[in-house]
Image: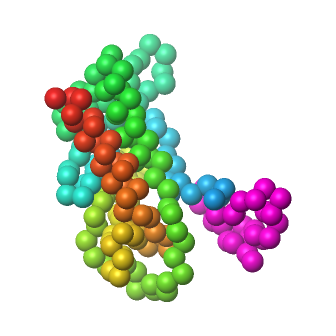
């Protein structure tokens, strides 16, 4: 009857009564904000990705200063900001990385944490503050699901493998094809 939601930004836990949502005909889980991490784009200097064995390095120089232009490169190759298709594919890739959301809250008791090799890794190299690392580790009894580990700590959440395959992986491949 109740769902607990944690707001990391203010370190606060909320309790929601699920029965109170009957008037909008939706489940509470469907409307809660499920993004794993929020980071100011102008604080990111680089993304280091390992997407199912494919290494990707993104130099990310986003700026909002008047008179200055953002610049980006993927695996050492500059992103052509004048080419709309390339810029759209690049933005799709970045949105798939920064907008990744969990699919399930696990009811498993994994007090010893999650073990195994990550299928996907995402590292935010930051201009200020500690770098941020996400790992997606296959669930031992269901490889269609991945445990989400944040800075070495299991979050208690899972994501479907297809979300990453149809997101990060697909957008990266599309971008590389356009940048040939």
What is the quadrant of residue 63 in the picture?
top left
Q: Quadrant of the N terminus?
A: bottom right
Q: Quadrant of residue 17?
A: bottom right
What range is drawn magenta here?
Answer: 1-29
Q: Is residue 39 left or right of residue 31?
A: left
**In the rendering, at what x and y percent does residue 66 appear?**
49, 16
Front residue (pair 166, 74):
166
* Residue appearing at x 50%, y 41% in the figure: 40
Magenta run includes residue 22 = yes
In magenta stretch: residue 104: no
Q: Residue most toward the top?
A: 67
| Residue 101 position in % (x across, y down) | 50, 56
Q: Residue at x 38, y 24 (%)?
A: 70
The residue positioned 37% from the left and 59% from the top of the image is: 162
In this rendering, is residue 74 above or below 3?
Answer: above
Looking at the picture, how far across and down is residue 106, in whole percent? 51, 76
Quarter in which the C terminus is drawn: top left
- Please tell me which residue is depicted at 46% across the width and 38% down the height of the picture: 41
């Amino acid at each position: 009857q109740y769902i607990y939601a944690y707001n990391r930004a203010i370190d606060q836990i909320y309790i929601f009564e699920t029965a109170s949502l009957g008037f909008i005909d939706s489940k509470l889980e469907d409307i809660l904000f499920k993004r794993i991490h929020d980071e100011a784009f102008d604080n990111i200097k680089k993304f280091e990705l390992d997407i199912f064995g494919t290494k990707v390095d993104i130099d990310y120089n986003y700026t909002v200063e008047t008179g200055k232009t953002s610049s980006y490169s993927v695996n050492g190759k500059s992103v052509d900001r004048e080419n709309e298709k390339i810029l759209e594919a690049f933005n799709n890739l970045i949105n798939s990385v920064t907008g990744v959301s969990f699919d399930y809250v696990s009811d498993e008791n994994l007090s010893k944490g999650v073990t195994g090799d990550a299928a996907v890794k995402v590292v935010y190299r930051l201009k200020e503050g500690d770098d941020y690392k996400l790992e997606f580790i296959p669930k031992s009894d269901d490889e269609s699901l991945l445990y989400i580990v944040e800075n070495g700590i299991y979050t208690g959440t899972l994501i479907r493998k297809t979300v990453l395959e149809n997101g990060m992986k697909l957008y990266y491949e599309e971008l590389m094809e356009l940048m040939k």
